Image (cartoon, rainbow, N blue to C red):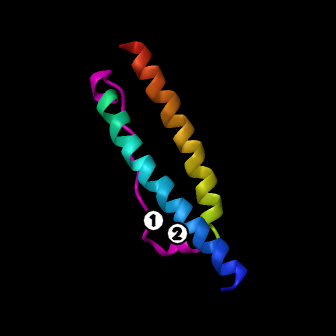
Amino acid sequence: MHEHTIQAGFRNDLYSALSDKLEVMAKEYNALAVNAKRLPITFESISNSKEANSMSCFVMLNQLTLVQRTVLQNERSLMACK
């Protein structure tokens, strides 16, 4: 298998795993946000779209990692408010 194809497959697998994890985190955050009367966050999965298979996947992984950090920080803030 060509090295580029292997790298793209790895990125897509990594993206899919992170995408799934973020969807779960968003649901957990939104459950806390309702109780704290904060606005919920929305997360739209694009793991099955053409974009997830493109070269922009690496950029999306970086963006999703930033979103993950933000969600974790917000969850900690909400937990501290309880």
Of mark 2 and mark 1, the one earlier in the sequence is 1
Q: Secondary structure at mark 2?
A: helix
Q: Position of residue 60 (x, y in %)?
A: 59, 58
Q: Position of residue 53 (x, y in %)?
A: 55, 74
The magenta stretch spans residue 42 = yes
For the residues marked 2 and 1, what is the alpha-carbon distance in whole angstroms? Answer: 5 Å
Q: Which mark is residue 52?
A: 2
Task: Check disc 2 and give the amino acid type.
Answer: Ala
Quadrant for the N terminus, please.
Answer: bottom right
Point out the residue furthest to the right here: 3
Q: Position of residue 26 (x, y in %)?
A: 39, 42
Residue denoted by label 1: 47
Task: Check disc 1 and give the amino acid type.
Answer: Ser
The magenta stretch spans residue 32 = no
Name the quadrant containing residue 66. Answer: top right
Which span is picked out in magenta? 33-54
Residue 9, compared with residue 78, is above or below; it is below
Residue 62, compared with residue 58, is above or below; it is above
Q: Secondary structure at mark 1?
A: loop
Q: Could you tell me which residue is drawn at 55 percent across and 68 percent down? A: 12
Chief SS of the magenta region: loop
Quadrant for the C terminus, please.
Answer: top left
Left/right placement of residue 2 relative to residue 36 reads right
Q: Are marks 2 and 1 in contact (CB under 8 Å)?
A: yes
Q: Could you tell me which residue is drawn at 64 percent across and 59 percent down? A: 59
Name the quadrant containing residue 35. Answer: top left
Residue 17, compared with residue 24, is above or below; it is below
Q: Could you tell me which residue is drawn at 36 percent across and 26 percent down? A: 38
Point out the residue furthest to the front here: 1
